Image (spheres, rainbow, N blue to C red):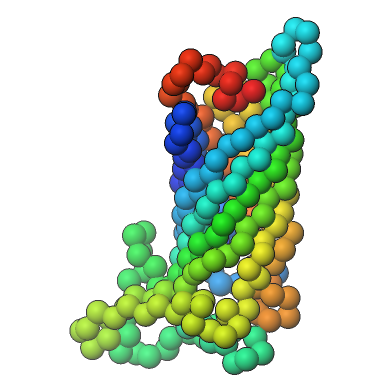
């Protein structure tokens, strides 16, 4: 199991601007064929829509359902010099052992990577007691694009390669519909969040068994417009 620290920002802009910024531990749960994840990052703008189910007479306890459609981008960088291939039966990775190809593998560069674009959504149930809130829900994504990337030098020439998912008839056997569970706890401006994908990133039996997971701490910010208060935003 490999973990990497990632900076993720969620933004929604309409009558109100909401931002949630924090450090999150992101990784791939690798049950076989480890890909040696080095680092990663992502951005996930969403539209928060919430419905209050009930509020007691003291206005301190509230049950809330959140519907959050959005978009997500995720990238994983690898230490390995990976070359993907799809032979019509499965996705496999080989190492680039060409001695003429040199890779920069440092803090700011990686030997290879893949990036994913998805339409995403979350349904979350939250229960608030004064300033404390517990949340649980499900999330789903549908992969609409992505690619494998390599960047290296060969005989002094800089070369970039991109293998787009859509160029492969089998979409490199990526499981385009992703889903999982999430849990969260908030106190005023602080949120602790975690999620785990129940679906594998690659179709079962078609490549490495990978599942994405996240755990992190966020700070919530907002700018008020049209007289909206903190309670309007965060329940």
- Count of residue discs: 0
For the N terminus, the quadrant is bottom right
Q: Quadrant of residue 185?
A: top right
Can you give x and y, in whole percent of width and height, for residue 151 in the image? 34, 75
Q: Is residue 107 left or right of residue 154?
A: right
For the C terminus, the quadrant is top right
Q: Is residue 54 left or right of residue 96?
A: right
Residue sitting at the far left: 156
Q: Is residue 170 shown above or below 42?
A: below
Can you give x and y, in whole percent of width and height, for residue 38 in the image? 48, 63
What residue sits 73% from the left and 43% below the top? 137
Q: Is residue 127 left or right of residue 18?
A: right
Taking depth in this image into account, of 190 and 181 the one nearest to the observer is 181
Q: Is residue 189 left or right of residue 194?
A: left
Can you give x and y, in whole percent of width and height, for residue 152 in the image? 32, 78
Q: Quadrant of residue 59?
A: top right
Taking depth in this image into account, of 4 and 47 the one nearest to the observer is 47
Q: Is residue 48 shown above or below 26?
A: above
Can you give x and y, in whole percent of width and height, for residue 56 in the image? 79, 13
What residue sits 69% from the left and 15% below the top? 130
What residue sits 22% from the left and 83% below the top? 157
Taking depth in this image into account, of 112 and 174 the one nearest to the observer is 174
The answer to whether any part of residue 36 appears in the image is yes
The answer to whether any part of residue 30 appears in the image is no
What residue sits 57% from the left and 79% below the top? 171
């Amino acid at each position: 199991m490999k973990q990497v620290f990632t900076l993720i920002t969620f933004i929604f802009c309409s009558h109100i601007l909401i931002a949630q910024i924090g450090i999150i531990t992101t990784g791939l749960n690798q049950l076989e064929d480890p890909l040696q994840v080095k680092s990663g990052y992502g951005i996930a703008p969403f539209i928060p829509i919430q419905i209050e189910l009930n509020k007691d007479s003291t206005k301190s306890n509230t049950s809330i359902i959140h519907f959050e459609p959005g978009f997500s981008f995720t990238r994983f960088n690898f230490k390995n010099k990976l070359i993907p291939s799809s032979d019509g039966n499965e996705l496999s990775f080989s190492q680039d052992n060409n001695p003429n190809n040199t890779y920069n593998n440092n803090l700011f560069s990686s030997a290879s990577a893949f990036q994913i674009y998805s339409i995403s959504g979350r349904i979350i149930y939250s229960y608030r007691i004064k300033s404390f809130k517990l949340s649980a829900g499900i999330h789903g994504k549908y992969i609409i694009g992505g690619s494998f990337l390599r960047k290296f030098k060969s005989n002094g020439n800089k070369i970039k390669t991109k293998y787009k998912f859509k160029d492969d008839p089998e979409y490199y056997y990526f499981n385009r519909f992703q889903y999982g569970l999430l849990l969260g706890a908030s106190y005023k401006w602080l949120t602790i969040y975690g999620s785990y994908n129940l679906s594998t990133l690659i179709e079962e039996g078609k490549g490495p068994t990978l599942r994405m997971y996240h755990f992190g701490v966020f700070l919530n910010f907002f700018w008020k417009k049209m007289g909206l208060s903190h309670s309007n935003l965060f329940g």
